[in-house]
Amino acid sequence: MSSTHTKADYKKSTKFEDSPKEIKQREERNKARYDMKKKVGAKALKGKDVDHRDPLRKGGSNMPSNWDLRKIGPNRGDNR
């Protein structure tokens, strides 16, 4: 049984990560985490992500009413 592996296209990946839209969304996600850390404390954030109920990539807002705290695995698993 052989598996076929393809090489990752790192140039394409970094091009996406450096796009102005992605940079803005990353800044908004970082701001949400910073604001949530001030609100609930660093201990409450350990092992958790700030989840946007309506994802930013689908036009969701970065308002606190759109945030939830979720465990890392399930939150990042939603993005696949």
Image (cartoon, helix red, strand yellow):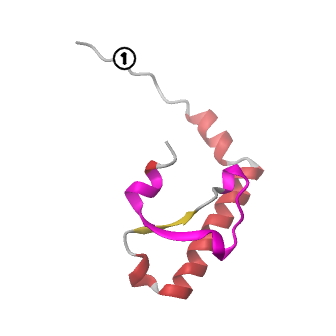
Look at 56% across and 73% down and name the residue there. Answer: 33
Which of the pair 11/23 is nearer the observer?
Answer: 23
Q: Is residue 3 left or right of residue 28?
A: left
Please identify the residue farthest to the top as the structure is shown. 1
The quarter of the picture where residue 12 lies is: top right
Q: Is residue 73 above or below residue 66?
A: above
Look at 59% across and 61% down and name the residue there. Answer: 53
The residue to which callout 1 is attached is 4
Q: Which residues are magenta?
A: 56-76
Say which amino acid is labelled 1.
Thr
Please identify the residue farthest to the left as the structure is shown. 1
User: How many C-alpha atoms fall within 10 Å of the one at disc 1: few (<14), some, or many (≥20)?
Assistant: few
Magenta-drawn stretch contains 45:
no
Magenta-drawn stretch contains 68:
yes
Q: Position of residue 38 (x, y in %)?
A: 55, 87
Q: Is residue 49 above or below residue 23?
A: below
Q: Position of residue 15 (x, y in %)?
A: 67, 40
Q: Is residue 24 left or right of residue 67?
A: right
Look at 41% across and 55% down and name the residue there. Answer: 74
Q: Position of residue 46 (x, y in %)?
A: 38, 75
Q: Is residue 64 above or below residue 29?
A: below
Q: Is residue 75 left or right of residue 39?
A: left
Look at 22% across and 12% down and name the residue there. Answer: 1
**How many numbered discs sit on the rendered protein?**
1
Q: Position of residue 16 (x, y in %)?
A: 67, 42
Q: Could you tell me which secondary element the residue under label 1 belongs to?
A: loop
The quarter of the picture where residue 6 lies is: top left
